[in-house]
Image (cartoon, rainbow, N blue to C red):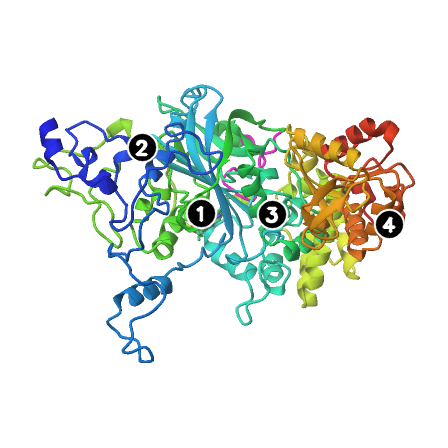
Amino acid sequence: EQELAAARPFNANKASEYGDASRTPAVGETFKPSTHAATGSTTTEIIANDKVGDGNPPKGENATVDPLDRVRVDPADRHLTTNQGVPVSDNQHSLKAGLRGPTLLEDFVLREKISHFDHERIPERVVHARGSAAHGYFESYDNFSALTRAIPFAKKGKRTPVFLRFSTVAGERGSTDTARDVRGFAVKFYTEEGNWDLVGNNMPVFFIQDAMKFPDLVHAAKPEPHHAMPQAATAHDTFWDFASLSPEIAHMLMWTMSDRAIPRSYRTMQGFGVHTFRLINAQGEARFVKFHWTPMQGTHSLVWDEAVRISGADSDFHRRDLWEAIEAGNFPEWELGLQIFTEEQAASFPFDVLDSTKLIPEELVPLTPVGKMVLDRNPDNFFAETEQVAFCTSHVVPGIDFSNDPLLQGRNFSYQDTQLTRLGGPNFHEIPINSPIVQIQNNQRDGFHRQAINRGRVNYEPNSLGGGVPYQAGPAGFTSFPETIAADKVRGNPELFADHYSQARLFWQSQSTPEQNHIVNAFRFELTRVQTPAVRERVLALLANVDDVLVSRVAEGLGMDVPAPLPLATDAPIPTYPPSPALSLMSRPGVTGIKGRRVAVLIASGVDDKAVKGQYGSLLKDGAVPRMVGNMLGKVKALDGDPIDVEISVEAGPSVMYDAVIVPDGDQAVATLAKNAQVLEFLREQYRHGKPILVFGAGSDLLTKAMIPTTLPDGSDDPGLIMGDAANADAAVAAFKAALAGFRVFARETD
Ligand code: HDE
């Protein structure tokens, strides 16, 4: 056998096709993860890369590294070639009939290059087009096999590679990151029993109850079809027209008008599977489950005015934040918590667990923590990975099963279907980022862009000519929960779906005062943009069923009277809930303190460098990201004569790019900064957006110039405005760090 193998033709660049890996496995033998369908190009050198970028786990530790290595291409020290491997002698000039003559059709080098370029784009996702992703792993806290036979939960410390794509929903591929919108939170687990996609959002409920309504919802939310405006925004008539005529949307509206829709970072968002799923153990016992991802970095959001300004300053704000955090080794982490409940419990709830406009209050079914997810590696190539990744809710593994949620059932069709157009055919599972880490074995064949070279004459099952392989896995394979169903074939909804408002009210009543203020402001903003008064009025009529205070505050903001409430869809008694503190962003401050928070240190010549350098270093030590910000790039001369590099100017890195600011001492520096209107604006915005401000000595003159109040609107002390001097520098920095960990001082808001 060894002699035979040595005698075979061997091409190191195509090892997976001609090397050992190409041997037909004996019956019952499984391929090693790295040996499945080769997708390497014949014309480019594939160089196995042990370390791709900082933060990349060593080979073998993260299984996705191995399979992807077979297709990674790094620039090699050799000449250019065509896609057929032909050396290219001249990459500057096309082939012409004479130097001043026409270009020849014969020029296959030019034609190939231009033609490939012409076809570089694929259709963007119809929703969730704008996204950013990263690799990482999920680590199980324990052996949870009593709950589920899903392999990621099989033992304590077990790591399963994941790829997570975050997204906005409504905007196009190049739209801004900080739009007011839901965020996608889609996780692909590469397990030893196939890929499991948990395709969730950063909000635990959804707009509609039945997949039938999804195209209408999306049409209404997307830019209006006649003029294609507005981009990445629901603040227009068609969305609110649809919303006001679909009362089941009430609960989700509360979430999308809340701060959840403008996260500070992908790293500071919760994620939810939304639907009820089933967990099944090896004994076939099933329980219902809801999936929750909780960020260790805390749940934090922007304020609306800030989100709007960020769109202008850096429309890649969230993409950049995620990328930079991972490059810096500040790996974001989430804990996976499960709400586990039985069918009997579900029957006792005052809502239907198949209704995706309802959540299960954590006070009713608490979260069971089962593991953590760490994102520790940026993709090598945006298109190959982030763009081509295909998440499908129908991708489940043994141990995970669906519920009958009519939204989920519809999704199970949609995701597979949409990839056929987006990725050009039925072989999208062979695209490296989508292929499982286990060998694919079946008799599906051919189709556009087929990569696998299936050998042998047998492409059917059962067979005897191929030795009977591959064969059915039987009970070891995926088995659906054998639910008993005896029912009429109907179109309609279960009764409890008709309660549209009780949980919208629960959400509103569970929010802190600043969060409630932001919800009122968001409704006011969006409805002010709506041009049709009747639509505004109908939204108010909907809100009148949610909460009296809410509707009257929104109506006041629009200069309207509160109309009669919309008629209810049910006569049944409406459930009431005690407030659920877990629904407030404030309830999850996180455990990583100031790690990853961005702090601007304003500098100019004459700055008190000793203090500045000390504070800079101490922030760095705690994992924060300080930046020396000045009037313009270059060096500034410090008090002791040493030069300090300005890292970014106030113009290129305006206030909204930072979570806090330090204004140092130094008469001359303060005088220089005070002459710059952008610096004053910088400080005013830091203040207005509730950000901690640490001021030393003469720096307080800058605050006076910027007309920043020294107390809160109610006259009390501002915990985020910290005045330090040389004598109490340490205490001041400690107070500043505490304020930074607390994130924002919303009591300042007067907008
Ligand atoms: Fe999606 N959704 N969706 N959705 N969705 C898509 O699939 C769809 C829904 C979600 O990063 C599409 O590959 C229907 C709920 C995320 O690639 C499409 C319905 C939730 C992503 C599709 C829903 C989501 C998508 C577009 C109602 C949260 C991005 C491109 C029945 C639990 C995944 C694609 C990524 C993407 C259909 C409702 C989340 C068209 C029909 C509820 C995170 O198939």
Identity of the amino acid at label 3? Met
Q: What span is colored magenta in the figure?
A: 348-362
Q: Quadrant of residue 711?
A: top right
Per the image, the residue denoted by label 2 is 478
Q: Secondary structure at mark 1?
A: helix
How far is mark 4 from mark 3, CA to CA?
50 Å
Identity of the amino acid at label 4? Ala
Relative to 690, 11 lies left or right: left
| Residue 537 visible in this rendered orientation of the protein | no
How far is mark 1 from mark 4, CA to CA?
48 Å
How far is mark 1 from mark 2, CA to CA?
28 Å
Q: Secondary structure at mark 2?
A: loop
- Residue 671 shows which numbered tag? 4
Magenta: predominant secondary structure element?
Answer: loop
Dot 4 alpha-carbon crowd within 10 angstroms: few under 14, some 14 to 19, many 20 or more: some
How far is mark 3 from mark 2, CA to CA?
34 Å
Of labels 1 and 4, earlier in sequence is: 1
- Residue 386 shows which numbered tag? 1
Mark nearest the camera among 4 and 3 is: 4
| Residue 413 visible in this rendered orientation of the protein | yes
Judging depth in this view, the residue of 387 and 648 nearest the camera is 648
- Residue 252 shows which numbered tag? 3
Of labels 3 and 2, earlier in sequence is: 3
Q: Secondary structure at mark 4?
A: helix
Q: Are marks 1 and 2 in contact (CB under 8 Å)?
A: no
Task: Give the residue at x 46% y 31%.
Answer: 137
Q: Are marks 3 and 1 in contact (CB under 8 Å)?
A: no
Identity of the amino acid at label 2? Phe
Dot 2 alpha-carbon crowd within 10 angstroms: few under 14, some 14 to 19, many 20 or more: some
Which percent across, then down, holds residue 394?
38, 42
Identity of the amino acid at label 1? Thr
How far is mark 4 from mark 2, CA to CA?
71 Å
